[in-house]
Image (cartoon, grey):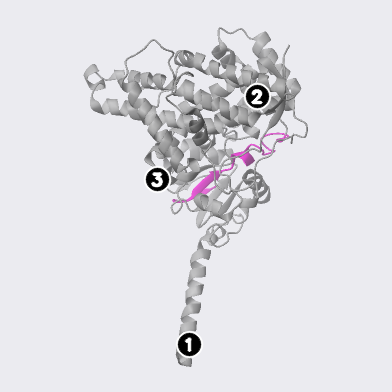
Amino acid sequence: MSLELITLLGGALSLLIVAIYRFFRQPYEFFQKRGVAGPKGSVLFGSWWGRWNKVQGEEDLSLVKQFGPIFGEYAGRTPVLVATDPAVARAVLLDNANHFRSRRANCVRDKFLHQGLLALEARGAKDTPLLSKDAVRQVLPRILACTNELSSSIKKLTENAEGKVVISGIVSDFLVKVLVEAVLGYDETEKAIDVKQFSNYFSQAFVNDNPDSPLAAFPMIYPSLVPLDKFVLKPKAAKYFTSLLLCKVQEKANAEKKDRQPDLMDLLLELHQASKKKDSEEESKNEENVLETKEFVFVQSLAVLLNASLTARSLTTMGTVMLGANPELQERLHAELYQKLEASDEFDLVHNSEYLDMFISEVLRLYPVEFRLERECCETLELENAKIEKGMIVTIPTYALHRQTQIYEEPEKFNPERFSRDNKEARDLFAFLPYGQAGNSTANISIQWSVLVAKLAIAALVKKFKFSPAEGAKLPPTFEPGVTGVPILQPQTVVAESRK
């Protein structure tokens, strides 16, 4: 090979290397050119390099302290505007919501998971009806049977294990029971469902494999190449729950009404059919509306199942831990629920307890359902303090937002008084986004159900037990490091003592 040819090939290779480098580096000049501060991007990973060794929420908090309430970062090659400014949150989630789409729901390929995530985020069908108080009361006995079993399980442990309770495991078992018996309507004596199998698949929701590996970041930063389906629900679990729910919906749609305690799917069926009564009797029975009703029940049931793994699990687990860590607040909640309030049933009890609302709001502030809320911009938008361009991701780091000192004084302190009526009215509504990708929206059956279940569980537990921290327990509780996708708390243990 001649020297000239070698020189020519060497020059071409050098140009190719430079071109490849520029291709990967060019996106990381996006915010610099626009005068927006933020961490530098590295080739391939963007701003995510090394995050598999960190707790996402703490990393967000550190970046906000370093760069301010609005800054730019990169998810792979995609620019991400990160904002802890409530005004930006309001603009994205309310005022200009039609300019944005759900990033997570649009990064899954399975149509059923896509629909379930949209419903979970309250971004599915418009004007989705909610369950009325009277409807919820119909299914209340099923939920209370589950809370009674939860209390019985803890009581056994107080007698046999010096009162030590691994509350995170007990809560998972409780939620499986709620889903099987109160949502799907299987009775305890039925053999039609393998509860152990159900529980195993339920534990596979929102789990990122090997979160301490760089590979765990790829579904988060390149979802078009590595879809988020496997993170939302493992393939076998998705297939199992899709088949189970579709069969159950079909069964209920074809079944005649029986003299039995209704479950949530029965209520959803009735709810959607009632909403169709605005049409004529002839139209409400046509095939299209029947299919629409089945789809509604399936999608809402899937959203309830997914949100049980998020809101209900986090709120019930950390609510119990916070009871133990704050004995004075625990006694105040017990006194309000069982000494001061007069209620016709447990639903009225938890619905009318102002302090219970304050307590669970503070739990959700400190221990959010998700570290981040994300939307993808579909149309360039000019805000007063930021320009959001088409294709850009907008991230609201809720963990960091809920710890901003200018919004919450002594943010690391657990203080339910932050959510008294006067304090809430004095604070921007969008400074508190407790429900993960749904933000602060309660126009959502899955959130309505999850919060109710958690409230009833906490009320039942504080009635029968006094909780305290287990010896050696970490307070405040800590999250697992790595690219976990959603907050994963390390196993939580409390000591339970039966009330006299």
SS state under label 1? helix
Q: Identify the mark nearer the N-term, 1 or 3.
A: 1
Label 1 to label 3, Cα distance in Å? 48 Å
Task: Specify the quadrant of the image occupied by residue 109.
Answer: top left
| Residue at position x 62%, y 52% in the image | 51
Q: Amino acid at mark 3?
A: Arg
Q: Quadrant of the C terminus?
A: top right
Answer whether residue 403 is magenta in the image: yes
Task: From the viewer's side, name the closer residue of 269 and 413.
Answer: 269
Residue sitting farthest toward the right? 471
State the mark number for residue 359: 2
**Segment tinted magenta in the rendering:** 386-412
Q: Tell me: 345 left or right of 253.
A: right
User: Which residue is labeled 1 in the image?
Assistant: 6
State the mark number for residue 207: none
Q: Position of residue 486 (x, y in %)?
A: 57, 41
Task: From the viewer's side, name the closer residue of 251 and 95.
Answer: 251
Q: Position of residue 29 (x, y in %)?
A: 54, 61
Residue 362 seen in render: no
Q: Tell me: 116 left or right of 86.
A: left
Label 2 to label 1, Cα distance in Å? 73 Å
Answer whether residue 176 is magenta in the image: no
